[in-house]
Image: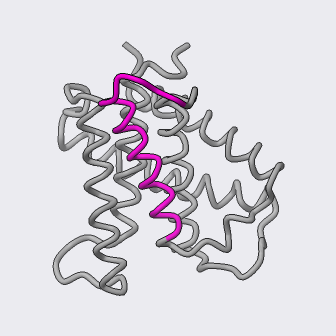
Amino acid sequence: MTSTPEQYERVMKNCKALFSSKMEDYGSAWRILRLPSLTDQIFIKAQRIRGLQTNTTQKVAEGEVSEFIGIINYSLMALIQIELGVSETPDLNTEDALSHFEKQAAVVFELMMAKNHDYGEAWRDMRVSSLTDLILQKLMRVKQIEGNDGKTIVSEGIDANYQDIVNYAIFALIHLKTFEE
């Protein structure tokens, strides 16, 4: 079996490639999105995945894989927005955007490695549907924190929830045997 870091890197490489291609197509138009708008985008994708997992029919040809990739990329965009603040205009070129993407991805990877060590790769015994539910739960938490003007009393902040969402989505893609070589 390929190691978690190798599988993780394969998934992230594909997510980054799509992010880069979309930067070429659209530029950094996403920089104008406020955090609640990004949260809602991620929520829509997670809800669609849950629907795909529970419905017997599907009317749009895109499946879970593209939606999980979207969750990862939008979550990384949100982490970039937290770092840089929201812009009134698309202000990043592709090179700068990719640099910020890689920086946030590295932070998320280190978090995954630390938690994976402590939890003993428990995610490998989880179902993709459970990972989807955990993503939705994290999004509900983010929405609550956003409703509290970003303040928490004892809980982790919005950034930690986005980081966990990225890792859960990557784990789901690994389970789905995406990007295997």
Q: Position of residue 47 (x, y in %)?
A: 38, 46
149 w.r.t. 116: above or below: below
Which span is picked out in magenta? Answer: 37-59
Q: Residue at x 82, y 62 (%)?
A: 93
- Magenta stretch encompasses residue 172: no
Q: Residue at x 55, y 45 (%)?
A: 70
Q: Nearer the viewer, residue 67 or 119?
A: 67
**Where does the N terminus fall, quadrant-wise?**
top left
Residue at the image point whose x is 47% and y is 39% from the top:
68
Residue 157, picture quadrant: bottom left
Q: How is the image coloured?
A: one colour
Report which quarter residue 26 is drawn in. bottom right
Residue 45 counted in the magenta span: yes
Q: Give the camera-side residue of 22 and 82.
A: 22
Q: What quarter of the picture does the C terminus occupy?
A: top right
Q: Is residue 181 left or right of residue 150?
A: right
Where's residue 141, x and y in %? 27, 66
Q: Residue at point 77% right, 71% down?
A: 90
Judge from the rendering whether residue 149 lies leftward or rightward of residue 90; answer left or right: left
Front-most of 62 and 91? 62
| Spot occupied by residue 56 in the image (x, y as percentages of width and height) | 35, 22
Looking at the image, residue 73 lies above or below residue 48: below
